[in-house]
Image: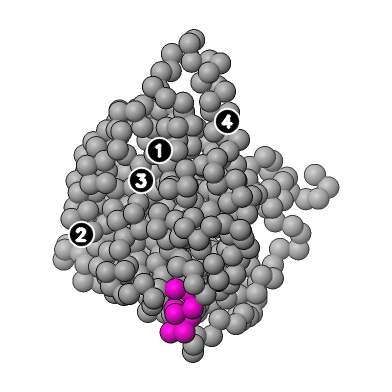
Amino acid sequence: MHVEDLILVSVDDHVVEPPDLFAGRLPKRYEALAPRVITKEDGSDVWLYEGQELPNIGLNAVSGRPPEEYGIEPTAFSEMREGCYDVRKRVDDMNANGVLGSMCFPSFPQFCGQLFARSEDKDVGLAMLRAYNDWHIEDWCGAFPGRFIPLALPVLWDPALAAEEVRRVAAKGCHAVTFSENPEKLGYPSFHNPHWDPFWAACEETETVVCLHIGSSSQLVITSIEAPINVMITLQPMNIVQAAADLVWSRVLQEFPRLRFALSEGGIGWIPYFLERLDYVYQHHRLWTGHDLGMLPSELFKQRIVTCFIDDAFGVENRHHLNLDMITWECDYPHSDSTWPHSPEALAKSLTGVPDDEVDQITHLNAMRIFQYDPFSVRVRERCTVGALRAEAAGVDVSVKSVGDRHERPSEPIRIIDLANRTKVTPASDDS
């Protein structure tokens, strides 16, 4: 299949929330308590909520920047492409990249709404979370019908309220919810605990996919305080490997047989060995561990787990060891791992030799079915291809642009950063 004939739906992108997100969306009594953007003395813009400052770190919004200007320092809206936070400009950037549809994970509330879960007054937190979900569904996704897949934040602190929110947003057409890859790390019960059953039941009932994004446990896989940041970036998908093992061996997939999970930004190249290991463990140990899944764990995984990748030629080559009906593609705009604005060309390298019908499954048909997303009801298929969308974006400038080096760069290699908690660990010296 020619690059210009691809139809691309990304199940993992990110929105940098605009400063006016909460305007007109809260009851009068809560308006003064809403998160707001302030500009600090160093020029960075941060969200302020209940005394907490939530910056957008540089790596979260670097599309269009030269790689040498990537970094972990807080950034300002003026340093980002407008497509990071302006939905009209976002669609321009999607068109320029030939991407038809996009599901956007949150930024300042953290991946699964941890910020609102930490609210001192949970009634206030619930009001903020619902306002956020309404903004995301109505203002962000609703601004351009057929271009976005809605994704809701969960009510982490109360599974009954979480179930109620899942049903509320499903009535608005949202059938995906972001959740933690390991809720125990956030101070909540694990996947193995019946605590979450009302939430799981609501997701199953509404056919809502539970999306587990790497980093959504607010924990990172690190080997040593002395390790360079490359080690942490390399090991980020290991969180998803752990989450996958947790899910397969938990009671959740057995007791909620129609519930599906997505391993967002986890890649797929590791999965064939993982499935082999699952079956080996089951066959060798189930008699004494007491696990009876009724099928091989690899079969359970293939039936219920949606897999996602950005750039994974090895995974695509070994796709028939996975469930081809559950493989989806990601762009990751505007994060540092994104392939924007050359996603079609990057993906095409991995798709070399793949039959057209399988290409269609991976690039858009699976995502459309799994997330109940139907862009062809809004625009004819011929206007959804990479070539057609790029023709609509003829005037969009995608050239790399420097914004200067506002922040002082460290004089030695960066070691470890806790991206989820927005804190930096003091680097060790090279002599240590």
Residue plotted at (78% across, 50% down) = 429
Task: Return the disc, 3 or 4, that comes first in the chain's sequence.
Answer: 3
How far apart in space, not on screen, are marks 2 and 3 (Cα)? 17 Å
Q: CA distance from mark 4 to mark 2?
A: 40 Å
Mark 1 Cα shell of 10 Å, populated few (<14), some (14-19), many (≥20): some
Residue with the mark numbered 2: 172
| Of the pair 355 and 232, the residue shown nearer to us | 355
Q: Quadrant of the N terminus?
A: bottom right
CA gap between label 3 and label 4 equals: 24 Å
Q: CA distance from mark 3 to mark 1?
A: 14 Å
Circle nearer the viewer, 1 or 2? 1
Tag 3: amino acid:
Val
Q: Quadrant of residue 351?
A: bottom right
Q: Which residue is under mark 3? A: 210
The residue beneath circle 1 is 303
Q: Which residues are magenta?
A: 385-393
